[in-house]
Image (spheres, rainbow, N blue to C red):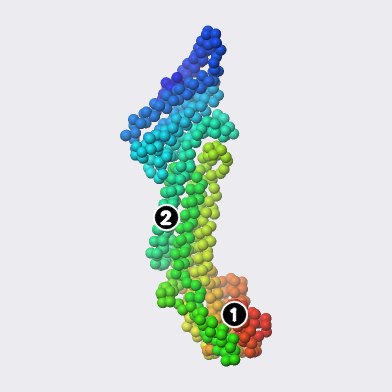
Amino acid sequence: MCGRFYSPSAQGLTAGSSMMVDIVTVAMLTRRILGEENDKAMESPDRDQIDRYITSSVKSAFMKIAHSVEIKADTSHEHVLASLAEETKKLLKIEANIFSPVLSRWHPQAAVLSASLLHKLYGNKLLHAYVKLWQGPFLEHAEHLTEDVVSVFPAADSLEQYIMSVMASVVGDDGLDSLCRQKLVPYEIESKSGMVVLRWVNGQLERVETWVKRAAEQETWDPISPQQRHGGSIVEVYRIIEETADQFFAFKVPMRIGELNSFCRGIDKAFQIYTQLVTQPIVDKEDLVPPVPVLTRYKKELGIKAFVKKEIQEVRPVDERKSSEIVQLTMSKLCVRLNSLYYAISQLGKLEDSISERWAKRQSDKINIRRSMNGKSKSVVSNQKNQFDGSRKEINAAIDRVCEFTGLKVIFWDLQQPFIDNMYKNSVSQARLDTIVEVLDLVLAQLCDVIVEQLRDRVVTGLLQASLDGLVRVILDGGPTRVFSPNDAPLLEEDLEILKEFFISGGDGLPRGTVENLVSRVRPVINLIKQELQSNSRKYYIIESKTAQQCAVELSRLGTGDAVV
């Protein structure tokens, strides 16, 4: 009955609306008169009759637009279901804005009836329409993000959201939940779309991991420029990830928070893979530190001999391949690795902000609709600020490991001969630490030329720690060419002070408190030298499971002083 009033022009709609008021009024009066003349009560109230008018006219109008869309399908670049969703939305707008206000005089929920009916009519097409290409219904066979899926899903979802908003304008948000359960069977586009998007995300993340590995493997670890001291691989990694994120947010199909979380977890994993590849050549401390010299003791100390034999057997020789890899890890290349790790962690915040802002913008206008469709209230705008905490933890641990390795490599590998092998050799006074400090000054100059300012203190602290470890090693495990007496203690203390002030560097180096704290752990070792020598070396080696520093502290407590080796 009302289908004839669906005119495409605004003037036609206005005229149709005005005419419909008169026609419906006459129709309702005529119905009552005829009922009275026939001497029978009205079988149904006016509302039921309007219900039938709306149902008939809406179905008729929908059939017309469906037929029109199908005729144009061959010449249109848009999928027929996407076009039909758009036309159905236009039809509902006409109904809600022009005709429902008139019909609501007799039927307060005329707009709800029209909206729910159009939801059902389009839903039948979406759920059951036969698609020749797939030999089956569209929604059932939508498994990948094809052009058709990308076209139909947003259109269908937009229609459903608009239908919900029309119904909410009549019954309010409070009444919408129960009304949806009574009158609507949700399309579940978001759920179906989520599975399709998740399949795309998993496929893309596999490719991202491949690209990340390739970028790291092809890296030469040279700085991009004096201003950009990181390697090109981390820039490539971010480019790949940002392009993937752009593609993810470019899809207009509905998504849930689960798809976003899966995407972010995959990106987090990609950064962790890159971090592991950066640190892959970094060997353990045992591979850098040369074996402890054989102890020389009195023959009667059989227990000590047995311990020495056991210790010799436990020394791990460095194979040639690993030795070659260590040599290739120059100071410059280690610094570029560190700079690349710092660039990776420093840019994570920007990536998180970008993802969080785009997701919030995408989802904010859908919160109320999703709440009603799901029958429960939940926020879909999630805080994405902690999505990459796994990467942050991994990168920070990697930076600490490379800083420690850099210091150990300088002292125990690059400077093994002047520091570990020759310092204090034969005589403390003739092979002092000052010659080593001059070399360390050159090392620090080279380091500061490449390392970024934000990591300078961390890597220099690693060098200080390694220097102190080397000093303790020389004093406690120096081999038969080194003999210390109480008279050497002042020289050793002076050298320790020189080393301390070198790293403080008049306030331009490390914080004094940091240096003092590390140096304080070495002082008990030098205090042993001050004590008179006693034949208590057996006590020193009883504590074989402890480190040299721990042994020194223990011996100091026991009142013994045999540090001669």
Q: In the image, what residue type sits under mark 2? A: Glu
Residue at (54, 82) in percent of width and height: 310
Residue 305 in view (yes/no): yes
- Please state the horizontal and vertical placement of residue 429, each as a whole percent of the image: 55, 89
| Count of number-bearing discs | 2
Q: In the rendered image, which quarter is residue 128 located in?
A: top left
Q: Residues within 10 Å of mark 1 (few under 14, many from 20)?
A: few
Foreground pick, 533 / 466:
533
Decide which of tag 1 and tag 2 comes sooner along the chain: 2
Q: Nearer the viewer, mark 1 or mark 2?
A: 1
What element does badge 2 sit on? helix
Q: Is residue 446 above or below residue 340?
A: below
Foreground pick, 306 / 375:
306
The circle drawn on residue 232 is none
- Please state the horizontal and vertical placement of residue 11, each as a whole percent of the image: 43, 23
Q: In the image, what residue type sits under mark 1? A: Glu
Foreground pick, 177 / 220:
177
Which residue is labeled 2 in the image? 206
Residue at (40, 55) in percent of width and height: 207
Which residue is labeled 1 in the image? 544
Please indicate whether residue 531 sits to the left or right of residue 33 in the image. Answer: right
Residue 344 in view (yes/no): no
Q: Are marks 1 and 2 in contact (CB under 8 Å)?
A: no
What element does badge 1 sit on? loop
- Please state the horizontal and vertical placement of residue 98, each as a whole percent of the image: 48, 24
Residue at (45, 25) in percent of width and height: 58
Q: In the rendered image, which quarter is residue 298 located in?
A: bottom right
Q: Residues within 10 Å of mark 2 (few under 14, many from 20)?
A: few
Q: Is residue 191 above or below residue 224?
A: above
- Please state the horizontal and vertical placement of residue 200, each as a whole percent of the image: 42, 49
